[in-house]
Amino acid sequence: MNFSENTPRNEVEHLLIEMNEGRIEAENFARALLDHQIFIPIQDEKHHIAGFQLSTKARPMVIEDEEGNRVLIAFSSPERAKEFTTMFPDQGVGYGGGLLIEASWMLRRMGADMGLSINPGQELGFDFDADMVAMLVSLLPEEAV
């Protein structure tokens, strides 16, 4: 099935449209995002056996923006990641796969002073600076021990 870039494919993308059209505020979008899944590309070391993973830790895609800030890259769906991840040439490590995870789970595990970009470079996208990410993390309920 082919989709245009602006055709919503899931609830996160419907929320992005509502925010872009001014029907919900950015803060309300951020709060709603906590209850949904997002896709994060994961680095994969190349190996001569297809599908074999060398490392034991998932390394999500983190890039530096123009000001030198670290930004975690995420997508509303795996299909939205394909074009973006191909812009990073393979240097022994590629982004051929990823994880579909709860946004709240990911936010709890992000590094301090890190931004978040959902669907970077796409109309159905949104960027959170590090302060916005910290605000989102503060909204999360405490995890049960």
Image (cartoon, rainbow, N blue to C red):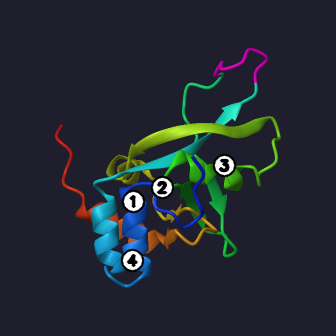
Q: Which residue is mark 4?
A: 19
Name which residue type carries label 2.
Answer: Ser
Name which residue type carries label 3.
Answer: Lys
**In the image, residue 56 lies at what x, y percent?**
56, 25
Name which residue type carries label 1.
Answer: Val
Query: Dot 4 surroundings within 10 Å: few (below 14), some, or many (20 or more)?
Result: some
How far is the residue under mark 2 from the one under mark 3? 12 Å
Of labels 4 and 1, earlier in sequence is 1
* Residue at point 66%, 18% (across, down): 52
Tag 3–tag 1 contact (CB < 8 Å): no
Q: Quadrant of the C terminus?
A: top left
Of labels 1 and 2, earlier in sequence is 1
Disc 2 secondary structure class: loop
Which dot marks residue 82?
3
Residue 35, compared with residue 93, is above or below; it is below
Which dot marks residue 12?
1
Name which residue type carries label 4.
Answer: Met
Disc tally is 4
Q: Does the magenta segment cover residue 23?
A: no
Query: Dot 3 surroundings within 10 Å: few (below 14), some, or many (20 or more)?
Result: some
Q: Which residue is mark 2?
A: 76
Does residue 41 appear to the left or right of 112 in the view shown?
right
Of labels 4 and 2, earlier in sequence is 4
Of labels 2 and 3, earlier in sequence is 2
Task: Please provide the residue range marked out in magenta.
Answer: 47-53
* Residue at the top extreme of this rendering: 49
How far is the residue under mark 4 from the one under mark 2? 14 Å
